[in-house]
């Protein structure tokens, strides 16, 4: 699924439509009835980790608590950069996703604290299910003012364009198309900003404590309870740049190495996001590579907890040596 930087980009793609009324709705979603959104007003949009939240109301309202300042409108045009991210994740022959160019690089985050927060919980209509939660699948994307098109023929030789799950046409004349995503209604989105790797309130102490446990660090990095928004690309790149083998137990790493790993997680994620706004392609050093930058042969294997989800992992055995627990010394004979 798209990682934190991509979902932040989707957030900015949607934000210019805040304050507009849905005049027409459609799509292939079976669990969500698109017609229910018609005539509603998009009042707010929030992002947390890999999830996007959209607030809809039956009446035009202004000044809602927790609303974000609107970025400048997103224009039509080049949508190549997000597709490049998908090529990195799926290879050059995989489906393409995209989003439009943006005018600002400022990260908009709601007022955050150390505990769970509920957006809009103090509004009169807080009890109503007016927040639409969007969780993206592997090929998930949002397109603004144009539809995704087929990049290659399917196995039967047909050139069929992807079918959007939801399409929202707004009173301002533009529209949004949502692809490969799951949507559900809730009264208020619940989020924990301290675990969001792209939040200003990301809690390094909690992240370090989680990483220091006696389990492979590659498992911990993908745990959204501590590293919300972190996905497989960020995992591979941060581990390589920190020189840490993915199966090394966190309890064997020195605090300095754990600090370096968290630094690389935040730096790579932030640079990836900034690159989106600047039109830069995010270059990876180890992910989907045959050789590391030092020229060593890269190992690839699906790794994950027993009975859990296995994710393809790339690492360099020479640049990322495995650490093993020290064997106890034999007792001294008296």
Image: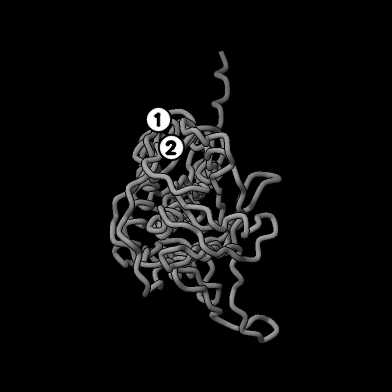
Question: In this figure, which residue is indicated by the disc labeled 2?
Answer: 193
Q: Name the residue carrying label 1.
A: 113
Location of the N terminus (image quadrant): bottom right
Q: In terms of secondary structure, where does tag 1 sit?
A: loop
Residue at far bottom of view: 157
Q: Secondary structure at mark 2?
A: helix
The structure residue drawn at horizontal position 53% and vertical position 61%, both measured from the top left corner, is 299
Q: Residue furthest top?
A: 334
Residue 128, disc: none
At horizontal 48% and vertical 42% (from top left) the residue drawn is: 227
Residues at discs 1 and 2 in contact (Cβ within 8 Å): yes
Q: Mark yes or no: residue 253 visible.
A: no
| Placement of 108 over or under 121, stated as above or below | below
Crowding near pointer 2: few (<14 within 10 Å), some, many (20+)? Answer: many
Residue 2 visible somewhere in the drawing? yes
Horizontal side, residue 31 vs residue 169: left or right: right
Q: Residue at x 47, y 51 (%)?
A: 235
- Could you tell me which quadrant the C terminus lies in? top right
How far across and down, in percent of the image, does residue 87 sit?
48, 70
């Amino acid at each position: 699924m798209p990682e934190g930087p991509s979902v932040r980009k989707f957030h900015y793609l949607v934000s210019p439509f805040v304050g507009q009324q849905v005049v027409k709705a459609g799509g292939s979603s079976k669990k969500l009835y698109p017609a229910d959104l018609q005539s509603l007003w998009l009042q707010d949009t929030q992002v947390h980790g890999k999830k996007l939240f959209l607030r809809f109301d039956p009446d035009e309202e202004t000044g809602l608590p927790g609303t974000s300042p609107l970025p400048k409108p997103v224009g039509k045009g080049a949508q190549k950069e997000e597709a490049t991210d998908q090529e990195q994740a799926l290879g050059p022959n995989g489906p393409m996703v995209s989003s439009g160019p943006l005018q600002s690089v400022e990260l908009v985050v709601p007022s955050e604290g150390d505990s769970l927060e509920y957006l809009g919980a103090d509004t009169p209509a807080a009890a109503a299910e007016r927040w639409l939660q969007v969780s993206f699948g592997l090929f998930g994307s949002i397109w603004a003012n144009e539809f995704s098109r087929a990049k290659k023929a399917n196995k039967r030789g047909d050139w069929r364009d992807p079918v959007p799950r939801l399409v929202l046409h707004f009173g301002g004349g533009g529209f949004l198309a949502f692809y490969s995503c799951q949507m559900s209604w809730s009264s208020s989105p619940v989020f924990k900003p301290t675990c969001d790797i792209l939040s200003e309130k990301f809690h390094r102490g909690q992240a370090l404590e989680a990483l220091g446990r006696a389990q492979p660090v590659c498992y911990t990095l993908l745990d959204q309870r501590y590293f919300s928004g972190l996905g497989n690309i960020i995992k591979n790149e941060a581990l390589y740049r920190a020189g840490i083998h993915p199966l090394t137990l966190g309890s064997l790493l020195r605090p300095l190495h754990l600090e370096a790993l968290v630094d690389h997680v935040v730096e790579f994620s932030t640079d990836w996001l900034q690159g989106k706004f600047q039109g830069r392609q995010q270059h990876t050093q180890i992910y989907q590579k045959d050789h590391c930058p030092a020229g060593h042969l890269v190992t690839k294997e699906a790794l994950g907890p027993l009975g859990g989800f296995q994710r393809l992992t790339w690492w360099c055995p020479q640049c990322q040596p495995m650490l093993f627990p020290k064997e106890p010394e034999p007792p001294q004979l008296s």
